[in-house]
Amino acid sequence: MKTFSPATATKYIRVLEDEKENLLQKESKRSTYMAAAEEEPEVPVYDYVATRKRIAEIDELVRKVRHALHAHNVTSVLSEFGMTVDEALIELAQLSAERRTLDGMRNRQQKERYDSYDLNYGRRCGEQQRDVVEYVYANYDVDQAERDYQEIYRRIVDLQSAIDYSNQTTSFEVEV
């Protein structure tokens, strides 16, 4: 039985996955070799059974630790938010997508001169130029988009801080 914090479990999984990737690369290079018909071949060191066994062991360890981490995240509650770590991670992904959208919206001007090279509005460089100046208007309050962006950004920081704190201060056990 081994005790992990969510942070150490994640690092342990990364170490195991790195070891597996290294084994797979070595296997790829050493599991076959080439030799000319009348040449004494240089056979690389490779043990099929030992390699397959170690990869299976790594997969089992990763599966056990990742499952225990997920179970921990589903049951550990971030009291200041009234949600589990798992729910917080989902909300964090949703907020990050919303933040990316609002970032573009907050950087617009309420009224901008249309640039014929702007592919966002369907015109290409080769189209005939017009004599009339065209404008693109934001159909929303740009200042409100800025305020919403700042609010979401603060929520992301607060959620991430709570998750980080939980990752460092809580623990769970895994049979490894």
Image: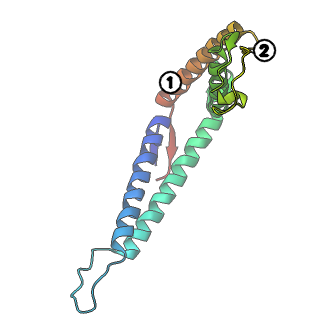
The percent position of residue 119, horizontal first and vertical second, equals: 66, 30
Is residue 79 visible in the rendered structure shown here? no
If you read the primary sequence from the N terminus, does the residue marked by circle 1 or circle 2 appear first? Answer: 2
- Look at the picture and state if 46 lies above or below 36: above
Circle 1 residue? 165
Closer to the camera, 118 or 138? 118
Closer to the camera, 111 or 149? 111
Is residue 65 visible in the rendered structure shown here? yes
Which residue of the protein is positioned furthest toward the right in this rendering? 139
Q: Nearer the viewer, mark 1 or mark 2?
A: 2
Q: CA distance from mark 1 to mark 2?
A: 41 Å
- Look at the picture and state if 75 lies above or below 61: above
Circle 2 residue? 139
- Look at the picture and state if 144 lies above or below 59: above
- Look at the picture and state if 63 lies above or below 43: above
Left or right of 119? Residue 44 is: left
Which residue of the protein is positioned furthest toward the top in this rendering? 143
The percent position of residue 40, horizontal first and vertical second, equals: 21, 87
Q: Which picture quadrant has residue 105?
A: top right
Q: Which picture quadrant has residue 141?
A: top right
Q: Secondary structure at mark 1?
A: helix
Left or right of 130? Residue 64 is: left
Q: Are marks 1 and 2 in contact (CB under 8 Å)?
A: no
Residue type, label 2: Asn
Residue type, label 1: Tyr
**Badge 1: residue crowd in 10 Å (few <14, some 14–19, many ≥20):** few
The percent position of residue 120, horizontal first and vertical second, equals: 68, 29
The percent position of residue 12, horizontal first and vertical second, equals: 42, 45
Residue at figure coordinates x 51%, y 59% from the top left? 60
Q: Secondary structure at mark 2?
A: loop
Residue at figure coordinates x 43%, y 46% from the top left? 14
